[in-house]
Amino acid sequence: MITVDLRSDTVTKPTPGMLEAMWSAKVGDDVFGEDETVNALEEKAAAMFGMEAAIYCPSGTMTNQIAIKCFTQPLDELIADQTAHVYRYEGGGIAFNSGVSTRLLNGYRGILTAEMIAPEINEENIHYPHTSLVVLENTVNKGGGSCYTLEHIKPIAQLCKQRGLKLHLDGARIFNALAHTGDSAADYGKYFDGISVCLSKGLGAPVGSVLLADKATIKYARRIRKVLGGGMRQAGFLTAAGIYALDHHVERLKIDHAHARILGEELAKCPLVTTVVPVETNIVLFDTTEPAEAILAKLTAKGIKANSTDTHRIRFVTHLDVHAEGVEYVVDVLKSM
């Protein structure tokens, strides 16, 4: 029996090439701005997305929370889908860190439209919080890896500009979205005021995310990062892994997507499965006839790790440590069930 870990794309281990890059990194004190490998990653990531500047942080939660703090004032309100990671999985940070309320919408698999957002923007009235920010997520975790295309994003960006709102992207799996849609990363900077890019999910780096924005925003973001405890001295050992990931692990994301489609097709044939959410990227959500925990116990007994997202819903996530042999093994186990 082998072990196949489908819990998340955060469970990956650094590859030999990535470890070598980390080992040989040139470092300095990043809080003083003297770590050349950190500086190189920030410059590289900003250029990739057509943004002016970037800041490296320990996590995507921190980059998102810094962005919200930069783009809002206390008593403001942001708009997001009700499945949004910034709302559900960041520990109430929107209220705690920024003193901001949240207007939640019901998008299709987490995907919002300008038509949904427009009527939810508050008029200026002392009874209402001031609407100042829209947050999108790409891909949508709770939507099963569903994707915005740039054609979806353009009218939202136009609406935000017309109404004086900032637009932030939680791009935790943005490269998965790009691999699926074929859009250009460089075009994203035209539409967003801030972009959070995670390096430790599908790209396989052990730690870190970057926040991209204009120079003035990133200057303020460095102050907020310091307050949150995110200043990490010789962080170049970590950002070297991020540079390696951007250079070597982006194109291969299509392999993860292919593996996810195979699993989705097999799950659709499984008698224990009632529904499989359409597979777009590397996340497979499916509903089960038995309680999810019972199914997970059967999978665990066969060496397959996964997570439940509801009482009868399970999530598989493919990544660079799930190889073709592992996918075949999971398929065989599903057939036996």
Image: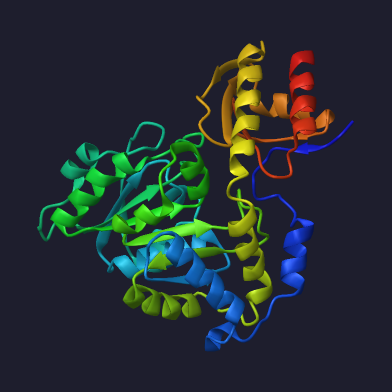
Split into 4 quadrants, where in the image is the C terminus? top right
Q: Does 11 sit above or below residue 317?
A: below
Q: Position of residue 131 (x, y in %)?
A: 21, 56
Left or right, residue 210 beside residue 252: left
The quadrant in which the N terminus is found is top right
State the residue at coordinates (57%, 87%).
34
Is 124 drawn above or below residue 215 in the view shown? above
Residue 163 spot, x, y in % from top left = 14, 55
Q: Nearer the viewer, residue 48 or 54?
A: 48
Give how far across and how far down residue 209 sits, in percent.
54, 62
* Residue shown at the point (62%, 31%) measured from the top left: 258
The figure's colour scheme reads rainbow
The quadrant in which residue 334 appears is top right
Answer with the quarter of the image where residue 153 lies.
top left
In the foreground, 154 or 50: 50
Residue at the location (64% across, 12% down)?
269
Q: Residue furthest right?
A: 1
- What is the x, y in percent for residue 177? 47, 42
Apparent side of residue 296 relative to residue 59 in the rendered image (left or right): right
Rendered image quadrant of residue 268: top right
Question: Residue, x 55% and y 70% (percent of image)?
Answer: 41
Q: Is residue 59 visible?
A: yes
Instruction: Look at the picture and state if 329 lies above or below 45.
Output: above
* As drawn, 252 above or below 265: below
Q: How many marks?
A: 0
Observer able to see residue 309: no
